[in-house]
Amino acid sequence: MEVSKELNIIIEGKHDKPIVIDLIFKDDGKPKPVVIFCHGYKGFKDWGAWEEMGIKFAKEDFFFVKFNFSHNGTDPENLTKFLNIEAFGDNNYIKELDDLQSVLDWMLLPDFKFIKQLKPDDINLIGHSRGGGISVIKAAEDKRITKLITLASVSDFGSRFPEGKKLEAWEKKGVQYIVNSRTGQQLPHHYQFYKNFKENKERLNIKKAAQKLQIPHLIAHGSSDTSVSIGEAGNLFEWSPAPKLLLVENADHVFGTQHPWNGEELPKTFNHVIAKSIDFLKTDSKELWDEYGDSDDE
């Protein structure tokens, strides 16, 4: 059966900006496990090969969901360009957690158009890079999540902020800029980003969240990742109670993909990650817990 797509559905989040969502699934009327994908920093749902990944999950009978965080800098009219730079500057981790909550709540409403095609007791999160950190926290907080997959995930938010004089300068100016290496754009971060982190430091502690997980966790990381150190995968492996580590030889931060993605075939490294992720999600949670749980004893 061909895969169906419902693209660019707009829902309102809690922060006055739309959340744009894609659904990819076999429209066969049968209930399926749900996979919700969270993009990373300077990312978006239509980046690179995320669509091809969604199709592969859908072909394996998953209900695949990807979405744009409301303040990622894109908007419904420009889904692959950061033209809404004010929104980008106003983004923070709490907004992203709220957006993910909004997507979860929306899908599980009784009047959701495809509610009969979802298994509400089988909801899985996949997060890439910064989206991995968001996914760890949400999976620890929300009992509806049954399995977690992090791809090239960060293990700490606090260490990514400047310190000392750089931090003082940011507070004084109220804004600092980061260059988007792909487009050359200067993207702003308003000081509220740091302030919001400090105010919510306990909740935004990825280590504490990982330690609280009560579900199996697949941790995939490329050995040649120059954006997020492979040591961060080691941290998550150490903290998660039932972790499975997938180290991908010679893979970079995006597992050999790029934006835009025009290739016919996905890179072997990315195909490998997708295949292992699908196997992980199809394996019974108890079996995974029995095999990978209590890793401290190893």
Image (tube, rainbow, N blue to C red):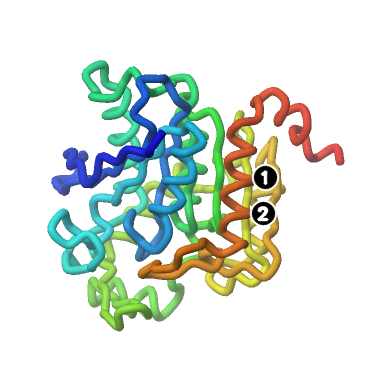
Which numbered disc covers residue 39?
Answer: none
Q: Is residue 295 above or below residue 81?
A: above
Question: Residue 97 location in percent, x, y?
Answer: 36, 43
Q: Which amino acid lies under the numbered mark 2 shown in the image of this protein?
A: Asn
Q: Residue at x 62, y 67 (%)?
A: 251
Asked if the residues shown at circle 1 and circle 2 are in contact, with their CB atoms under 8 angstroms apart, the answer is yes
- Position of the N terminus, as image quadrant, is top left
Q: In this figure, which residue is indicated by the disc labeled 2?
A: 235
Question: Residue 279 location in percent, x, y?
Answer: 64, 38
Which of the 4 image quarters holds residue 116?
top left
Q: Which amino acid lies under the numbered mark 1 shown in the image of this protein?
A: Trp
Q: Check the image and name the residue furthest to the right.
A: 298
Please state if 257 lies on the left or on the right of 215 as rendered: left
Residue 195 visible in the displayed image? no
Q: What distance separates the C-alpha of mark 1 from that of mark 2?
A: 6 Å
Q: In this figure, which residue is indicated by the disc labeled 1?
A: 239
Mark 1 surroundings: few (<14), some (14-19) or many (≥20) residues within 10 A: many
Q: Is residue 154 above or below residue 105?
A: below
Q: Residue at x 35, y 40 (%)?
A: 24
